[in-house]
Image (spheres, grey):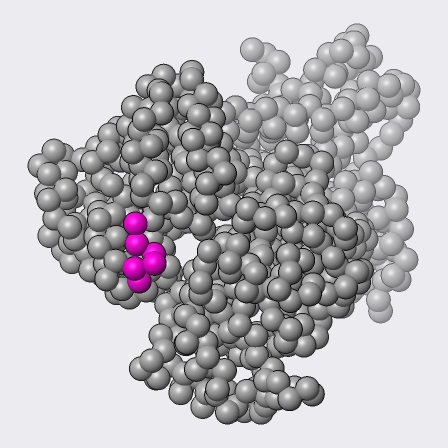
Amino acid sequence: MYLLKLLWRNSFRHRLRTTLTIVGITIAILAFGMLRTFINAWYAGVDASSASRLVTRNAISLVFPLPISYKDRIRQVDGVKTVSYGSWFGGIYIDEKNFFPNFAVEIENYLKLYPEFVLPPEQLNAVVHDRKACVVGRKLAERFGWKIGDTIVLKGTIYPGDWEFVLRGIYRGKEQGTDETQMFFNWDYLNETMRKLVPRRADQVGFYMVGVADPSHAADVAAAIDKTFRNSLAETLTETEKAFQLGFISMTEAIIIAIQLVSFVVIIIIMAVVANTMAMTARERINEYAVFKTLGFRGCHIAGMVFGESLVISMTGCAIGVALTYPVARAFGTALSDYFPIFNVAPVTIAMDIGAALMVGIVAAIFPTWRAVTIRIADGLRRIG
Amino acid sequence: MAIPFSYSLRNLWTRRLTTVLTASGMALVVFVFASILMLAEGLRKTLVDTGSADNVKVIRKGSASEVQSGIERQQAAIVETQPEVAIGANGRRLLAKELLVLINLPKRGTSKTSQVTIRGIQPESLQLRPQVKLVAGRMPRPGSSEIIAGTSIAKRFKGGAVGEHLRFGMRDWTVVGNFDAGNSGFSSEIWGDVDQLMQAFRRPVYSSVLFKLADSSTFDAVKERLESDPRLTLEAFRETRYYANQSEMMAKFLRILGISLTVIFSLGAIIGAMITMYAAVANRTNEIGTLRALGFQRGSILVAFLLEALLLGLVGGCVGLFFASFLQLFTISTLNFQTFSELAFSFTLTFEIFYKSLLFSLIMGFVGGVLPAFRAARKNIVEALRVV
């Protein structure tokens, strides 16, 4: 108890310096936490994916479609429980800045595959019975102030023209990590329109979502589906939803690595700042350390004091930083909701914050401690300033 | 009278550990600052090199990029007959009707696949892009299953080098050449005869039409005519504008990331400099008193301490830039969210970035040092001398 008091008093002997250092640590911890949260947000799609869902797409690449006739053949494969299908629509609402994901899907089975999207039964019924109906996530509806019954017009990029939809349902996420910014509409509407406009592009889907009965056999089912269509005009590539999402992210790996590096750089910068503070502190107190030694305190006591002070400073900064992380993350999440539907601070991020602060505190104290412990009493007493 | 410059310099030297720690903190910030500027510059340079202002790119109306676009044969033929299209040396129009598709190919050394852009070309495609040069092998013969690959593809993807084979579209394709396109995005593309590729991918439409204007100033006229023609549902862009649009999101992303990181990091470094300078002032109260007693003005003291802080910043800036300059050896390749294709660009150091970074480090030094320097200058002579 007495020691803690001494450490606390010692820490605030140079009030300005300590305050500045703590502010520095707070900023660094905050930045570190935000960058980590940012990376987590990048991987949000992967975390939200389920092991019992497979994605079947054209083996050449995502931009090539598959014929709708594959639906029944996929359903015949052993272990397949539910099949839904859809296409990435890529429509623009008024302006490109208003980006949100929009898909044409076979809604009934699609929602069965995604139990985390909760849609009231009467709304589902309305959607299924209205060709032009669409379903949007709660956050998306809030963003543009849409209400049930509103007409929404999207400008097609892949499918030319202006497309009119009527909002018939708003889904909610079951969990915190569920994406509530997507839009779905009836694939039939897309297909019937394409049949009229560009018959060559009708009866084609971008992907099949396949629900498997037993997730532990997902790999076998995927292989069986691909085998069915081998050597056909449109060979398929089936993978778990997670692998599919990771495939996307691995293409942006360079950015993730850069952000990860940067998040460590900020810790190193603050380490230099704290180490500097501790070095200056120890230099000024060489005299006192010599007095302590004269009184009979051992090297380990003095080491404990320097380390303790360094940790008091870094942990104080860390505590403030962590406390600030939540409101700042919320503010960022709102501002960046177009890019990142999910922007939540993970518990592991906080653990890493604390770990980083501990490391900063310890590393910063090493050199000053060594100086304080090894100084000879006579030299220490003789030194001025 | 000014305090000699060496006073500031030697003060930094006396407190080596502190100086090194503070300067290295600043060096890291300058490193990050410079690297982000270099990245943005690299991206910009890639874009500038990719397009030419005389070229016009025509895609389907409403489609954000070539990948989503589709142009029917008869529509492409109408574009071809526009009088503004330049005529080449052999009397043919400098116009290429091209196909663009994305396919997944396995990378060398791993089992991972990545997206690659395949472009169906016509003989004029090369003339329209003078930055593209064949570095190995020969051009593919029209009507054959021959392709050429960009240098970046040859290096990173299995089967991309001359003499190797790639399989896609249910056919085997022989790589007969490699081309280099400098910094431009074409380096990560594969080119082959457009009619063969249309067959292989069963896509009976072109993706885009690219042509050179005989007179650059006629762009507005031809754009107006193409976009108002009732037979066409097309949009025309200058090629430079087109590519700038393509990576607008990436550029914006880099800019936001860069600004926010730099601001946060520089706060940390400024605090570091401030701590150092306040300590320097506190430790030297006696010295300051002596200097004032000797007749140095408050202004001179202020300048001396500011100089010290600026020097600290400059050292950090130089070290940071030194390490950042090595980044030029690296190339970043990432997915362009807008086109879903790979975009490769390298860190590029320009003189502008050089002096911006140094200026930035000086500003950090200044902001960190100005308050402590004022405190030093305001010290009362008698009190300062009395401090032990």
- Between A374 and B354, the one nearer to me in the picture: B354
**Which residue is drawn at the image coordinates 55% and 32% (left, top)?**
A317
* Left or right: residue A210 compared with residue B2: left
Q: Is residue A109 magenta?
A: no
Image quadrant holding the N terminus of chain A, namely top right
Q: Residue at x 70, y 75 (%)?
A: B130
Q: Position of residue B263 (x, y in %)?
A: 57, 52
Whether residue B314 is visible: yes
Residue A255 in view (yes/no):
no
Q: Which residues are magenta?
A: A198-203
In the displayed structure, does residue B268 sit left or right of residue B310? left
Query: What residue lies at 82% left-to-right and 38% top-to-bottom?
Result: B17
Q: Residue at x 72, y 33 (%)?
A: A275
Say if A12 sits above or below B130 in the image: above
**Image x and y of residue A90, in percent:** 36, 55
**Tally of numbered discs:** 0
Which image quadrant for residue B63?
A: bottom left
